[in-house]
Image (cartoon, grey):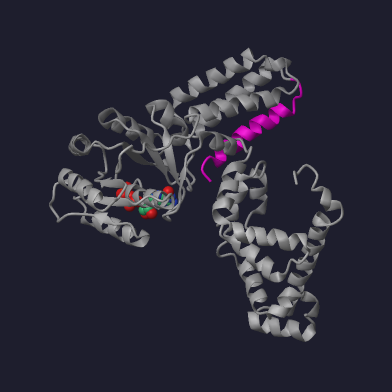
């Protein structure tokens, strides 16, 4: 995960602080030095680090943390707030035009993930009920047009393109006419990239900007390139004026410097982050949640949102009913498992839970991929090899039935025994939770 090493270092710093009970001025100074080093090693711009640490120190002194009963907590709170602020404070959304279509111009260097991000943004907007149109304005690489067409086909989003050799400004202008006549309410223009910034590229982008007046210019940069990404953002912003940044490849092991410096150096907020190669791997960037993740305070909000998006509300209701009546069957179990699998990877889920950073390490080589998890696939095969009667009443599954199920699912009788035992235990636990005592609700949880 991105930020892994930074997160680990900051957490160690706080652990040291916590161990001290009351803090001395020297303890706090040592912590500040550690934080400074951790940020520099994460490839955060040195000017940003300097002012960040100065601010934290100033606030720590101002808040009289040495007098506070829980000084370590007070320091963590300040660091959390300042990290959030550093990354832009609140979430920044894209500008939506009062009169459609909203015109979004995507810019960036080659290989940053621009065309993929066009697809991802289209996916997101379509989910929100919009009717996007993609525009292939990268005329120098014929493969780029083809790539966008493939993505458009996959997403069922139309792609506007013109014959080879057409002028990108003309393409962009014509695409707007097309959008008007086809009721497309968002136009996403995929512009040309280059390996490096050059005058010619900037001129072309400026022409497009001056002629189509986009509501939103988004720069796509690669998080893995660290401070280079920040420099690229600075140049594009100076020449073109950016509305926001899409930071891609956050699923990689980038040190995180770009995410922490872009806003402070350029004044442009990160609006989205790319978290994978697939076309649904784009998330709005929430500075507060990212800060909590770095400090291992968890990002429960994102987890809940992901679960809500993934889980089928009707299924969840049915499940709850079955639980309350203590009629939870293997069919329900299978169903639940399939919903959980949709969450994708255990790794991602654990990363969002507070204090789980350490556990993730301990799990070591546990299969994190829920979608293709072998153990889950075995359980699924076993349940599917059962008859409906067996699924709703496991008591009837005797020895010969176990043999048949094992043969039918390509597993061993021991595997069937293990699953049935686990299921019985799970039911017992559920009974406790929803039974007589459980009526009062679980401790600490509202009913
Ligand atoms: P462009 O030249 O800027 O248009 O870049 P592309 O969209 O063709 O992407 C370049 C490569 O980066 C492709 O292999 C993409 O699959 C990959 N890529 C883009 N975004 C992400 C991301 O968020 N995560 C990962 N892991 N790969 C990405």
Q: Is residue 285 visible?
A: yes
Q: Residue at x 55, y 31 (%)?
A: 38
Residue 82, percent across and down? 55, 25
The x and y percentages for residue 117 are 37, 48
Q: Position of residue 147 (x, y in %)?
A: 29, 57
Q: Which of the two residues, 291 or 163, is positioned nearer the viewer here?
A: 163
Name the residue located 49 percent from the left edge and 20 percent from the top edge. Answer: 51
Q: Is residue 169 left or right of residue 364?
A: left
**For the view shown, which residue lies furthest in the right direction?**
436
Depth order, front residue of 107/153 = 153
Image position of 87 with respect to 338: above or below: above
For the point 17% across and 43% down, the residue is: 169
Nearer to me, 18 or 184: 184
Q: Which quadrant of the figure has residue 422?
A: bottom right
Relative height, residue 200 to residue 249 (above, below): above
Report the label total.
0
Predominant secondary structure, magenta span: helix
Residue 241 covered by magenta stretch: no
Q: Is residue 165 above or below residue 57?
A: below
User: Hey, which quadrant is residue 380 in on the image?
Assistant: bottom right
Q: From the viewer's perspective, is 152 left or right of 263?
A: left
Looking at the picture, tell me which residue is in the foreground, 343 or 185: 185
Residue 410 visible, this orientation? no
User: Would you place residue 40 above or below residue 121 in this image?
Assistant: above
Instruction: Find residue 103 and report its horizontal and vertical position in percent.
Output: 29, 41
Bounds of the magenta span? 1-22
Q: Which residue is drawn at the image coordinates 33% and 47% (left, top)? A: 114
Look at the image and say whether residue 16 sits in the magenta stretch. yes
């Amino acid at each position: 995960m991105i930020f892994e090493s930074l997160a680990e270092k900051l957490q160690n710093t706080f652990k040291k602080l916590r161990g001290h009970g009351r803090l001395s001025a020297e303890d706090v100074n040592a912590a500040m030095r550690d934080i400074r080093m951790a940020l520099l090693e994460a490839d955060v711009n040195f000017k940003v680090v300097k002012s960040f640490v100065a601010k934290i120190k100033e606030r720590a002194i101002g808040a009289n943390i040495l007098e506070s009963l829980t000084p370590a907590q007070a320091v963590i709170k300040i660091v959390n707030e300042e990290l959030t602020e550093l990354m832009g404070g609140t979430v920044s959304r894209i500008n939506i035009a009062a009169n459609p279509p909203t015109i979004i111009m995507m810019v960036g260097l080659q290989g940053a993930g621009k065309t993929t991000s066009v697809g991802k943004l289209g996916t997101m907007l379509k989910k929100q009920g919009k009717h996007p149109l993609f525009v292939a304005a990268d005329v120098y690489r014929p493969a780029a047009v083809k790539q966008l067409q493939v993505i458009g086909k996959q997403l069922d989003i139309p792609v506007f393109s013109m014959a080879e050799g057409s002028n990108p400004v003309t393409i962009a202008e014509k695409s707007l006419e097309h959008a008007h006549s086809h009721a497309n309410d968002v136009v996403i223009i995929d512009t040309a990239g280059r390996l490096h910034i050059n005058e010619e590229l900037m001129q072309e982008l400026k022409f497009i900007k001056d002629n189509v007046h986009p509501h939103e210019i988004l720069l796509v940069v690669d998080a893995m390139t660290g401070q280079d990404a920040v420099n690229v953002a600075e140049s594009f912003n100076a020449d073109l004026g950016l509305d926001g940044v899409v930071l891609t490849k956050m699923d990689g092991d980038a040190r995180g410097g770009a995410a922490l410096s872009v806003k402070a150096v350029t004044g442009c907020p990160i609006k989205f982050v790319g978290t994978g190669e697939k076309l649904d791997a784009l998330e709005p960037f929430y500075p507060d949640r990212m800060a909590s993740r770095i400090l291992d305070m968890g990002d429960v909000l994102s987890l809940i949102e992901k679960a809500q998006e993934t889980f089928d509300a009707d299924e969840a209701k049915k499940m709850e009913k079955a639980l309350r009546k203590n009629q939870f069957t293997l069919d329900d179990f299978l169903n639940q498992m399939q919903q959980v699998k949709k969450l994708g990877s255990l790794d991602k889920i654990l990363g969002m839970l507070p204090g789980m950073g350490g556990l993730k390490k301990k799990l070591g080589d546990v299969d994190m991929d829920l979608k293709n998890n072998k153990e889950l696939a075995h359980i699924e095969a076993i349940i599917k090899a059962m008859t409906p009667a067996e699924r709703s009443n496991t008591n009837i599954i005797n020895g010969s039935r176990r043999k048949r199920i094992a043969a039918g699912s390509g597993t061993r009788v021991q595997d069937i025994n293990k699953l049935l035992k686990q299921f019985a235990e799970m039911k017992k636990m559920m009974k406790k939770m929803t039974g007589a005592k459980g009526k009062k609700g679980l401790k600490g949880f509202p009913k």
